[in-house]
């Protein structure tokens, strides 16, 4: 207790010292002896008086300087979000790449037989300068050495590569591939086609580079006749220069190849004599020997007419190919060509002005892949954007298959019948869609179409999937199966039509056993082709005393996001639609079932619907998933 009292005493003395207070008489202030407030007080350390305590500094009585106002902080501009670059990889999902049906079927690059180096250089637009071949005598400077290399090889590939100083272009006229030899165009290299019609001219035929009543005047850029185990491969480009001004013939220095093609739309009865890009054929179509032709990884673009036509070939593979017409070099982004710069496709024919800007719908008859009269066809992992059919399966021979048939041709129909066609994992853009026909007179059977995406981009001619024919070139089409189809922005979304035109004849169409499963038409904001602006046509044949309705047409999980248009009015000798058809719905959903059943109730001619759908509706499958289906065209050369 004594120790605590002693400590407390010390604390009191210490506090008094700090405050300068003292209860002694001597510490009492008086008027006679005032305390000077300016003098510092020196307190005594109560713990150890020998240790000084720093005196408390007097408060400065001068006024405090005002604090300068803080400048307002400028607001920070929001950072613009970084837009990732557009994905143009064209990559396929793992499920597609691991398709068990395609395991072991991807082509392999052949052994190189001969290598040729480029001696020309493309300009900044990816074209050849006009001066290179303005003189028709220099229209195909590389043709002879490429052909000599092909002729010298008994097997393997002739490989076109870049030059030692960066040269990256070849310029050639028609080339002939032979059995066992493949043309290989290296990545970064382009093989350009001559723009001189004289180089392609077939003797005693219509003038190449002009219009006529038939289209037999031009050789293709690359032709393989009676060839076995040949092809065109590589990650380079073959460019047909369809938008280049011609240098010889009637329209020399006046029109482009595509201007000549457009004349077929403005001149009655005209057919264009323009060269195809690649043609595979046989000397004797009744005894075809062409086998196993391969297109692999190559880019085909700007063809004056069709890009690839294998006719009468047993074994065709088209794998990982890109087809693009027109490329950006011949158009503008979005195909937004200024008025007066494109080919005339209506009104007065244009024969005096070379067009300078092109759109897909002004590059006529530039079909991408047209397998005709062929068997065992595989078309897989391709990207296609062009001015006509993306893929068109055809079977035609006017002598052996179109009545009346002369005795010497009787029994030959089966030679030309198309069979065993597989079209798997393909993306179509600006095209007339995935077509069967119009020529079906020799028969088409056993076709599988799976994982197909079509984006019509609201083009006036945009088409989805269709089987099209008429009584001038009709025939039997059977065993066709679609499974996994995503479509958007296409007016003619789903068509099976035996009255594709009003032409007449005795080749009567007969279409049956077609299944459309997991089909999804996707509405797109701001598209002009949603809902009632999208058409479905189902029309069998009934003319000339022949009654051949569509039979066993199965719609299974066939869904439109909104209700399409089903009815088409009659026109001339073409009956209204739907008509002359037997449709089976189910077991999956059919989103426009009410339209089909309503057509029956309204007595559509010979139109029957069998309803096999799972009921109630909640038991039905969900619409086919198209959320990852639509991808950008995988090339910066695309105007899309």
Image (spheres, helix red, strand yellow):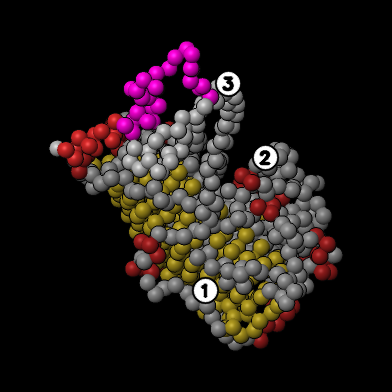
At 41% from the left and 33% from the top, the residue drawn is 43
Comparing marks 3 and 1, which lies closer to the viewer?
3
Q: Which residue is mark 2?
A: 346
Q: Is residue 610 above or below residue 304?
A: above
Give percent across and percent down for residue 355.
74, 47
Q: Is residue 37 magenta?
A: yes
Residue 325 seen in the figure: no
Mark 1 residue element: strand
Extreme residue in the top direction: 31
Q: Residues within 10 Å of mark 3 (few under 14, many from 20)?
A: few
Compare residues 373 and 615 and report the one nearer the observer.
615
Residue 111 seen in the figure: yes
Q: Quadrant of the N terminus?
A: top left
Q: Earlier in the sequence, mark 3 or mark 1?
A: 3
Q: Which residues are magenta?
A: 13-38
Q: Is residue 627 above or below residue 339?
A: below
Q: Which residue is mark 3?
A: 63
At 48% from the left and 20% from the top, the residue drawn is 35
Give percent across and percent down for residue 536.
41, 40
Left or right position of 378 against 342: left
Please identify the quarter of the rendering in which residue 130 is found.
bottom right
């Amino acid at each position: 207790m004594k120790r605590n009292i002693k400590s407390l005493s010390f604390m009191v003395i210490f506090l008094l010292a700090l405050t300068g207070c003292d209860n002694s008489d001597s510490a009492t202030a008086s008027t006679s002896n005032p305390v000077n407030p300016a003098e510092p007080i020196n307190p005594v350390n109560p713990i150890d008086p020998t240790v000084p305590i720093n005196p408390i500094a007097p408060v400065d009585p001068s006024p405090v300087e005002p604090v300068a106002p803080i400048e307002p902080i400028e607001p920070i501009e929001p950072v613009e979000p970084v837009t990732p670059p557009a994905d143009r990889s064209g990559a396929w999902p793992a499920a597609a790449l691991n398709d068990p049906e395609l395991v072991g079927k991807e082509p392999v690059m052949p052994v190189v037989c001969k290598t040729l180096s480029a001696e020309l250089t493309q300009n900044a637009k990816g074209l050849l300068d006009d001066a290179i071949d303005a003189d028709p005598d220099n229209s195909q400077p590389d043709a002879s050495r490429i052909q000599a290399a092909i002729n010298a090889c008994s097997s393997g590939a002739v490989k076109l590569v870049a030059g030692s100083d960066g040269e990256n272009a070849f310029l050639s006229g028609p080339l002939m591939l032979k059995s066992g030899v493949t043309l290989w165009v290296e990545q970064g290299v382009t093989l350009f086609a001559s723009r001189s019609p004289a180089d392609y001219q077939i003797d005693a035929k219509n003038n190449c580079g002009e219009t006529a009543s038939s289209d037999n005047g031009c050789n293709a850029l690359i032709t393989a006749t009676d060839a076995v185990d040949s092809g065109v491969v590589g990650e380079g480009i073959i460019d047909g220069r369809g938008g280049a001004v011609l240098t010889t013939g009637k329209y020399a220095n006046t029109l482009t190849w595509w201007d000549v093609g457009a004349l077929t739309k403005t001149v009655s009865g005209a057919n264009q004599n323009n060269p195809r890009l690649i043609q595979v054929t046989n000397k004797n179509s009744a005894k075809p020997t062409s086998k196993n032709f391969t297109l692999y990884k190559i880019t085909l673009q700007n063809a004056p007419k069709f890009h690839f036509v294998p006719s009468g070939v047993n074994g065709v593979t088209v794998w990982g190919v890109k087809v693009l017409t027109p490329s950006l070099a011949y158009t503008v982004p979005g195909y937004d060509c200024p008025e007066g710069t494109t080919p005339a496709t209506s009104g007065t024919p244009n024969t005096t002005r070379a067009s300078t800007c092109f759109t897909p719908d002004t590059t006529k008859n530039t079909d991408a892949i047209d397998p005709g009269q062929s068997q065992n066809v595989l078309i897989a992992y391709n990207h296609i954007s062009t001015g006509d059919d993306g893929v068109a399966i055809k079977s035609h021979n006017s002598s052996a298959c179109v009545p009346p048939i002369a005795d010497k041709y009787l029994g030959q129909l089966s030679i030309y019948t198309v069979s065993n066609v597989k079209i798997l994992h393909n993306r179509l853009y600006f095209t007339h869609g995935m077509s069967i026909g119009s020529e079906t007179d020799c028969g088409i059977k056993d076709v599988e179409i799976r994982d197909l995406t079509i984006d019509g981009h609201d083009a006036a001619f945009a088409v989805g999937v269709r089987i099209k024919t008429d009584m001038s070139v009709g025939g039997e089409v059977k065993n066709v199966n679609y499974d996994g189809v995503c479509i958007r922005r296409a007016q003619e979304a789903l068509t099976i039509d035996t009255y594709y035109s009003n032409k007449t004849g005795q080749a009567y169409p007969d279409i049956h056993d077609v299944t459309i499963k997991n089909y999804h038409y996707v509405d797109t904001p701001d598209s002009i082709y949603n809902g009632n602006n999208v058409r479905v046509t189902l029309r069998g044949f009934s003319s000339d005393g022949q009654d051949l309705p569509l039979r066993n047409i199965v719609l299974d999980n066939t869904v439109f996001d909104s209700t399409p248009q089903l009815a088409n009015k009659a026109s001339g000798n073409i009956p209204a639609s739907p008509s002359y058809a037997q449709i089976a719905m189910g077991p999956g959903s059919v989103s426009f079932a009410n339209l089909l059943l309503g057509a029956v109730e309204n007595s559509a001619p010979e139109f029957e619907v069998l309803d096999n759908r799972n009921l109630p509706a909640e038991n039905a499958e969900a619409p086919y998933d198209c959320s990852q289906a639509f991808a950008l065209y995988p090339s910066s050369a695309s105007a899309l």
